[in-house]
Amino acid sequence: MTKQRSEPRISVNKLAQYITSRAARQNQILQNAKFPPDYITSYYREAAEAIARFLASEMIDTAILEGTIKSLNQTVPATVYETRRVAGNIDAIETFAAMLDDIDLKGAAAQLGSQIAPHLPLQGVSISVRHEVTLHSTAKGTPLIGGVKLHFPTTEPLDDEQAGYVSAIMQSFCDTHLWKHGTTYAPHCMVVDMASKQVYPGAKSVIRRMKDVKSACDQIASLWPSITKL
């Protein structure tokens, strides 16, 4: 039986792509959001977990990355799909390792993000934002909070504009759900994209971007009931 979400829900990365895409691509994104394929959330599971653990080790324990690659290489896939998935995870970790010189946490301490994080409700749409890691620092006695969002699919690299929307939504998430841990700090809300091999810093023009996000969510909420399985 095909899985179907009755209420509007979308991931932060997909929402950023939706905002910047043409109608045909927007329709495809909403199709996958309402009728999500089973494989979507777990495809890069090992890579995401290893990278998050490495970041939380203050980017010191490279054995985390090396050990995950070794474990994946020893896996005996049972299907063609699993063979591709394992290879994709290895490639993602190796790509991340080659990007380490570009990652600057700006003195923040990284902690693993919650596995069960709340969604960000906006204009009737539930946005899945969960940071793989949260970033914590202090400036003039004031606790600061942010996080790192990872992006993997090699066929869907993010660009500057899309990463800016992801960062803006992450900042809204911090304002809504992480305020007890500190004041949201834009430079701590960064995006690491293995597809484009880019590290995108935190967005500064948040108000303008969030207007676009709210407009897109209004549209998604309006269209959701009419989306049918193709």
Image (tube, rainbow, N blue to C red):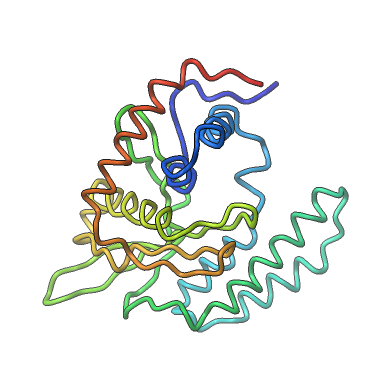
Q: Position of 21 compared to 118: left or right?
A: right
In the picture, measured across the screen, residue 117 lies left or right of residue 121, that is right
**Relative vertical location of residue 35 with respect to residue 173 in this rendering, above or below:** above
Q: Position of residue 185 (x, y in %)?
A: 24, 64
Where on the picture, by quarter, is residue 109? bottom left
The quarter holding residue 86 reads bottom right
Where residue 154 sits: x, y (%)? 64, 57
The residue sitting at the left extreme is 140
Rendered residue at 24%/46% (across/down): 176
Q: Residue at x 76, y 65 (%)?
A: 72
Q: Position of residue 177 (x, y in %)?
A: 28, 48
Q: Determine whether, in the image, residue 191 is placed left or right of residue 94.
A: left
Above or below, 17 against 84 in this view is: above
Image-quadrant location for residue 87: bottom right
Looking at the rendered structure, the number of numbered marks drawn on it comes to 0
Q: On the rendered image, what quadrant is the C terminus found in?
A: top right
Above or below 218: residue 81: below
| Quadrant of the frame with the N terminus | top right
Relative to 46, residue 214 above or below: above
Residue, far front: 22
Viewer-side residue, 24 vs 47: 24
Residue 141: x and y in percent read 12, 74
